[in-house]
């Protein structure tokens, strides 16, 4: 065997070994979430990530046959972190909106629930019209803060980095009302911390602001990955896994209208 033949044989063996390795290797994805938006995602004191978003993400990864790890990130920097490749996808109750679609590519929705207003139990505010001149708290850089800016221009809007901070302020009488997803508010009101308050009213969905529901966000143009998530969402809806997770957290189908 001459040198050329030996080199070719060695290269062929290396190529076959590489192919065999890649064939059995499992694809890995890093999922970004906030970790401060219960019951959808929350970082517990013991370091465990819990919530509907997290369980759905795990089910989608299992359906896609990929190994997923999780990273938490502050909400106001979560899209830049995705763009800088800190993680591969965002599963954090991110609403599919035209503004965000300029920055990321989305899967189809995996849930869709309306916004709502909560006020203290002893509040004199009886309806949304009564919010005129009042201070409304909202998490910044969210569809809910955008909703209040558009539909409640006669109210003062106070923005917070996380939902936990506006909850603390309304419980201590520093603001008059808060706006957020109706599920987030409802679950909070069931807790001891939320005993201060009540739902004033659900709000009609504004498609321009609220979009088409919450989707999985990937980097702009990564359509193939977004499509894989969309297919996995449809699959877990069909095989019952979605309902199993849904029923763990809610007594109604958060997926919304088909």
Image (cartoon, rainbow, N blue to C red):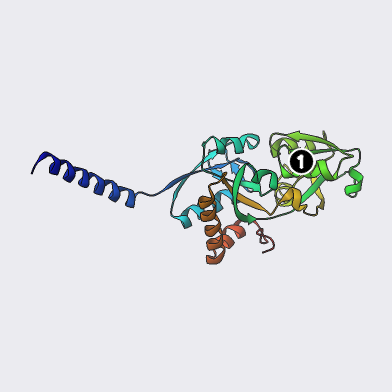
Asked whether residue 7 is in view, the answer is yes
Crowding at mark 1 (Cα within 10 Å: few <14, some 14-19, many 20+): many
Residue 111 found in image quarter:
bottom right
Residue 120 seen in this snapshot: no
173 horizontally vs 252: left or right: right
Q: Residue at x 59, y 62 (%)?
A: 243
**In-image side of 138 versus 46 (left or right):** right
Going by the image, does 46 lie left or right of 214? Answer: left
Q: Label 1: which residue?
A: 145
Q: Which quadrant: the C terminus?
A: bottom right
Residue 169 sits above or below residue 254 on the image: above
Of residues 145 and 169, the one nearer the viewer is: 145
State whether residue 236 is above or below residue 136. Answer: below
Q: Nearer the viewer, residue 183 or 208?
A: 208
Spot occupied by residue 62 in the image (x, y as percentages of width and height): 46, 55
The x and y percentages for residue 126 are 90, 49
Front in this rendered view, residue 40 or 16: 16
């Amino acid at each position: 065997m001459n040198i050329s033949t030996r080199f070719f044989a060695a290269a062929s063996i290396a190529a076959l070994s590489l192919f065999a390795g890649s064939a059995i290797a499992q694809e890995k994805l890093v999922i970004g979430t906030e970790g401060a938006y219960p019951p959808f995602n929350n970082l517990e004191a013991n370091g465990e990530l819990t919530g509907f978003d997290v369980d759905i993400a795990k089910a989608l990864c299992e359906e896609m046959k990929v190994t997923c790890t999780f990273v938490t990130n502050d909400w106001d920097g979560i899209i830049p972190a995705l763009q800088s490749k800190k993680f591969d996808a965002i599963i954090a109750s991110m609403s599919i909106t035209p503004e965000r679609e300029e920055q990321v590519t989305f899967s189809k929705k995996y849930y869709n629930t309306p916004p709502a207003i909560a006020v203290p139990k002893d509040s004199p505010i009886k309806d949304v019209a009564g919010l005129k001149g009042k201070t409304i708290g909202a998490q910044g850089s969210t569809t809910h803060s955008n909703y209040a800016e558009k539909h409640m221009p006669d109210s003062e809007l106070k923005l917070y980095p996380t939902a936990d901070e506006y909850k603390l302020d309304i419980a201590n009488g520093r603001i008059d009302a808060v706006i957020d997803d109706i599920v987030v508010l409802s679950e909070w009101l069931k807790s001891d911390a939320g005993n201060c308050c009540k739902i004033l009213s659900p709000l009609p969905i504004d498609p321009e602001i609220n979009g088409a529901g919450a989707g999985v966000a990937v980097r702009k143009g990564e359509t193939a990955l977004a499509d894989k998530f969309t297919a996995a969402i449809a699959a877990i809806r069909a095989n019952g896994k979605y309902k199993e997770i849904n029923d763990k957290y809610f007594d109604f189908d958060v997926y919304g209208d088909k």
